Image: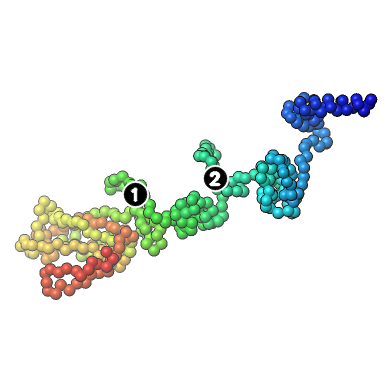
Amino acid sequence: MKKFFFIIIAICGCNSFTNAQVGINTQTPAATLDVTAKNPKGTSPNTDGLLIPRVDRQRAQSMKNIETSTLIYINNVSSGSQNGNAINIDTVGYYYFDGSAWVKLTGNGGSNTNIYNADGTLKSNRTVTQRDKTLNFKSDIVNGFSVDDTTLSVDAANNRIGVRTIAPKAALDVNGNMILGQASATNQNGSYSTVVRDNSTGELKIAQSSTGNTYPISYITFELKNVDGDWVQDYNTKINSTDYTVAVIGSSFIDPSTPGATFLGLKDKAGFSPLNISAVSSGGTWHISADYYGSLPLSGKNGTWTINCLVINKSIIQTLPGVYEDMEGNKVKSATAPPVGL
């Protein structure tokens, strides 16, 4: 009789479990299986939690007919091999079965697939909104960061950036053509410098003299008063001839006694007076000479020269070999070839 009564209770109990939810440490389970901590609060030293089956890699690799979503904890990876359904098992941690292989879960000793441990492909467009936060990439190697291989490469070892190269040779190395912004027209007080290319290294640099001047071409007027009649034999401009070339582009001479119409001649006779004016390099600086050859101001007074010059930075000038031609007594002749370098 007692045996029969126990069977009835067992059947009723099984039927209750079949049609209801099961709770552990709770009489009101909230899911199919609800495991509630026995001590959800307080300072009890007793252990609460759920122990997942613990196996080594060989055991997991040997399992057959595994149901999808089966969860295990790998506690040893020294056994078995990383192939077959254990292809992903490389560290201890939690793994679930996805139908063909054990897949690693994030957890103590485990890791998930992300940018830090695996390559990946974006499924759709992504936007990173930084607002007031910084985004900093740290590296210590050549080509430490790149976009599409050589499209953009950061050499963190030498603090360089390469465009279409993974081995930049300067702070910015562009292996190809560039488009620079166009400056608006400026007056004589413009504050632009000229970028030049070092033909030996390919580097772009600001054209600059030894004194720090970055203007490629400067305009200057020399007004030389009270000269010896109309003669300036040698005026040292102190302009460095190593850095600059001086070109005379205009001049005028005034007799202070007759500024409206300066008369030149030899003694008391007015006549033709060829202009002889030049700028030459001597002793490391540029010197100017000016004269109306064979003449003097008829007033006998000392005059004033106004000489207009361009001072050109030599970094933008190519100095070509001289051309030495025998005209053979002819008035007309053509060169056999253009000057070397043009």
Q: How is the image coloured?
A: rainbow
Q: Residue at x 12, y 63 (%)?
A: 274
Q: Which residue is mark 2?
A: 121
- Quadrant hosting residue 32: top right
The percent coordinates of residue 50 (x first, y second) are: 77, 37
Residue furthest out toward the left: 269
Q: In which quadrant is the C terminus drawn?
A: bottom left
The percent coordinates of residue 306 (x first, y second) are: 20, 55
Query: At label 2, which amino acid type do we have?
Result: Thr
* Residue 217 appears in view: yes
Tags 2 and 1 touching, CB below 8 Å: no
Q: Nearer the viewer, residue 57 or 47?
A: 57
User: What crowding class fits label 2: few (fewer than 14 Cα within 10 Å), some (14-19), or many (20 or more)?
Assistant: few
Kindly report which numbered mark, 2 or 1, lies closer to the viewer in this rendering.
2
Q: Residue at x 26, y 53 (%)?
A: 219
Q: Nearer the viewer, residue 152 or 276?
A: 152
The percent coordinates of residue 49 (x first, y second) are: 78, 36
Query: Of helix, strand and loop, which one carries label 1?
Result: loop
Q: Residue at x 46, y 52 (%)?
A: 151
Q: Nearer the viewer, residue 217 or 305?
A: 217
- Quadrant hosting residue 70: top right
Q: Which residue is mark 1?
A: 192
Query: Of helix, strand and loop, which one carries label 2?
Result: loop
The percent coordinates of residue 241 (x first, y second) are: 31, 63
Query: At label 1, which amino acid type do we have?
Result: Tyr
- Tell me the CA gap for discs 2 and 1: 46 Å
Q: Nearer the viewer, residue 18 or 307?
A: 18
Q: In which quadrant is the N terminus drawn?
A: top right
User: What crowding class fits label 1: few (fewer than 14 Cα within 10 Å), some (14-19), or many (20 or more)?
Assistant: few
- Quadrant hosting residue 208: bottom left
